[in-house]
Amino acid sequence: MKPAVTKLACRNIWKVFGPGGERFLRGAAKAPSRDAFTRAGLIVAAEDISLDVIAGQILVIMGLSGSGKSTLVRLMSRLIEPSSGELIFEGKDLRKASEKELIEIRRHKMGMVFQSFALLPHRTVLGNVAFPLEVQGVGKAVHEEKAQEIIRLVGLAGRENCYPRELSGGQQQRVGIARSLISDPHIWFLDEPFSALDPIIRREMQDEFLRLQSEFQKTIVFITHDFEEAIRLADRVAIMKDGRIVQIGTPEELVLAPADDYVRQFTKHVVRAKVVSVRAIMTAPGPDAAYAGSVKATDHIEDIADAVEKAALPFAVQDENGRIIGAVGRRNIVDVLIGREQS
Amino acid sequence: MQRAALSKPLPAAFWLALAALSLSLAFYAKPLGEALSLEWLVDYPKLWIVPIQSQISAAMHWLIDEASFGLFTLREALRFLSGLMEVPMNLAIEGLATGLLSGTGSRAVEIFPPLSWIAVTVIFAATGHYAKGWALAFVQLACFLYLALFGQWHSAMLTLASIAVTLPFGVAVGLALGIACHTWSGFDRFMRPVLDLMQTVPVFAYLVPILFMFGFGPVSAMIATIIYALPPMIHNTTLALKAVPDELREFGTMVGCTPSQMMRKILLPSALSGLMVGVNQVIMSSLNMVIIASMIGAGGLGYDVLFSLRRLDIGAGMEAGLAIVVLAIALDRLSQALATRHPPARKTTSRAFPLNYPRSFLCVAVIAATWIGGNWIEALQTFPEGWQISTRQYWGELVKAINLNFYDQLEAVKLFFLATLLLPVKGFMLGLPWAWVIGLIALGGYKLGGWRLALLGTMLFGFILLTGQWDYAMISLYLCGVSVLLAILIGAPLGILAAEVKGFSRVMRVAVDTLQTLPTFVYLIPVVMLFNSGDFSALIAVTLYAVVPVIRYTAHGLDQVSPNLIEAGKMIGCSKWQILTKIKLPLAAPHMMLGLSQTIMFALSMLVITALVGTRDLGQQVYTALSQADPGLGLIAGLSVAFIAIVTDRFAAVAAKWLTAGG
């Protein structure tokens, strides 16, 4: 496993809306209470947010509407100016970047997909996808060729000359995705990209998204209000409520150790077999037990359940190096499926 | 404070008592004032009138005659400017109407002919086809053939030429100012009251200063038209830019657009259909102005109408008026279609060059063919006079017939309205002491909207009083008030019908659309035809014009009531009548209230124009100023109209808020 490299880090990011918000924040010795903000006529959209976006990973920020998740992604890209805190992008403080530097960073290092697609109505698919390169001043021949290639990649070949309104919602968002990838960004922001789509199409787009990610290995910040979507896509999930991050962790950590009742409400209905890995339920290996076979510690229960169920004997659990670190049997799996506390 | 005033409305009895007191004052104030020697409270003494009017006139004279920038005088600068604008103006007139001539008068020799009637018609039909297909092409064809057939071609082309020149100027300046408003909020704050004023000051008012600065002629008319057409363009530009979704802006920022790229590549193209609505309004405003502008030197259809109105030649006026309507319909439909046009998916074309652009090719071919062919066959160049149809004498005879056969009935109707409605209200308004009226405005303003509104109302009406326009303003108020009342009485039921009865709504929409397309002046022609000049004719014209927003806002307000609520009403078991009165009307009320202030605006703008049929109000003052070339009087009377409009608008707005909060 590669060592985790932080691509973008938020350090104590605050966003306060309202007149004199920054002054109020600077004047306070320690973080003021919510009541104090309300009394000053201010609204806190992001409270003391610190998180790391790891290179090559998908960080999903999940929250209900009004939780501040869309504000957070806009703070990360400086579409909204933070009231205080640091934004370290590739080792440099993004908040200290000048307007000109910021334009350069956005042109070459950031890509963003929007909830309602944000396609330019007067341009064809080709024109929309090539737009970022056109803004950069890349020659027409080059950008059209590159656009063609990426349009093919998202499965829209043959639709280059359509206008956005002639496409279905799913196709429009494919255009949005293609457009955000054309300048090969270092970090890819997706703001509820599939929320406006029908459930079946949404599923299809999630698969498409995972396929693209396996190809490109982008660093991704993905916003959603759909917990299922979050655990399906995420390497790590950050759960937001009222402008605060309640918990950050892998889907498994959230399911197994929810930080509070709020998180538990979401994880309660998750199919645990899809999220929980063998490592979490294995028991200590017996001194010289007999095994029906072996599974990996990182396998999800769903993947091994059939095999374990059929065999009378437990399975050996191996780590990355093939060492046996535990055992897993039928009872362990049933425990997970029915949510029984492990005995 | 404001909220306290709103939350505790005075009892109805108080307002009733106030009304009763006003009524008695209107009749007995004069003798009472004389008895108590307080006449100055009743009639504002002439001696106290502040001579702003003559000062403005003097200042204007000084500016034009003496003001100098050192190297050149203001007069020279203006002459230079108007010379500059004359170039495109002449080019358009020559291209469409007169042709390029050498020499003047009857000795003129045509060097280059204007576009032939066939070419113009084909160009418009082809544009129609491009914008919306065959139906619109046919409309364009019919409209332009009408102009040719009924002998209005030459005048119509003069009018078209002035619009063709005004349009790019108006659009470019409006666009630039709109973008500036959008970019700098400070500029927006500055422009907002300026636009308010520009839209409420009647056009006549600024004809006088323009006449002063640029002299009589097409250029002055063009400048007046541009000024008149600017506010809607600016307004639409800022609206359209504001309506661009935030996500598109954010997208632009995220791909690293510079501010200029953002404007050129994202905001303006995304706002295009909104901008085209502005362009459509510029065209319609220009058409609306043609008749008015002909008072300061625009030729064409407007001049024809004005000329015949002055001679009371109803036939000729009707012909030219109808031609304006036809031209208005053609241009309105065309520009609306262009505004809503979606580009079709691009097809890869492999046909030979001209066939790729069949419409452009056709136009060029027709222009060339008629130009060359016109040398031998006159009919290709100008529509032969022998083919033309004149309806002039029919209109004249119709009027004669109506007057012969229905004179008594029409006169009876007119007298009835005059005796029972117009004259009593007029007497009431003129009888009210000025101090009482201003007191009422202050009190009403304070009770409805707080001390700010009271102050605004008092100050603006104070201006009217101090400058000696009081009586004229009262007549304007009375005519406007009665017409608005009538417009509501007629328009509201029609609006309800349009919203409730399916088949009726389409008929109504066409009627309303057409009424709104008609230039204001056109309303006057049939009215004068039937009722001659005077207050009653003005009343009818204003009511006809002001009824449009009433119908529109009523129908729209009812239409936008959520269908869920109506379904809920049905399921509870409401009858149709109950659904209308208990669900739809209360919910539509705020929207209808918005329509009220629009209606008042419409009424006031028409009122000024009815000065031509002999009302004695502020409009007449402006008109007089125009004929006497008195910029001071023109400006003051114009501002007075604007102030009445502003005060009534603000009062209607707070009253609407008050009503909806109470209901």
Image (cartoon, coloured by chain):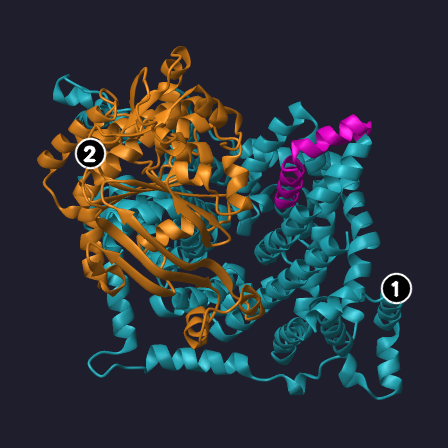
Chain colours: A orange, B cyan
Name the residue at 29% across, 74% down.
B75
Q: CA distance from mark 1 to mark 2?
A: 78 Å
Left or right of B48? Residue B209 is left
| Camera-nearest residue between B411 and A65 | A65
Q: Position of residue A156 (x, y in %)?
A: 26, 23
Residue indicated by mark 2: A216
Q: Chain of mark 2?
A: A
Magenta stretch contains residue B655:
no
Residue indicated by mark 1: B16
The residue furthest top is A310
Mark 1: which amino acid? Leu
Q: Which residues are magenta?
A: B547-576
Magenta-highlighted stretch: main secondary structure? helix
- Callout 2 secondary element: helix
Mark 2: which amino acid? Phe
Q: Which mark is residue B570?
A: none
Q: Chain of mark 1?
A: B
Q: Position of residue B197 (x, y in %)?
A: 51, 65
| Camera-nearest residue between B181 and A244 | A244
Magenta stretch contains residue B550:
yes
Name the residue at 79% across, 60% down.
B425
Q: Position of residue B192 (x, y in %)?
A: 47, 64
- Nearest to viewer (mark 1 / mark 2): 2
Q: Is residue A101 visible?
A: yes
Res. B458 image quadrant: bottom right
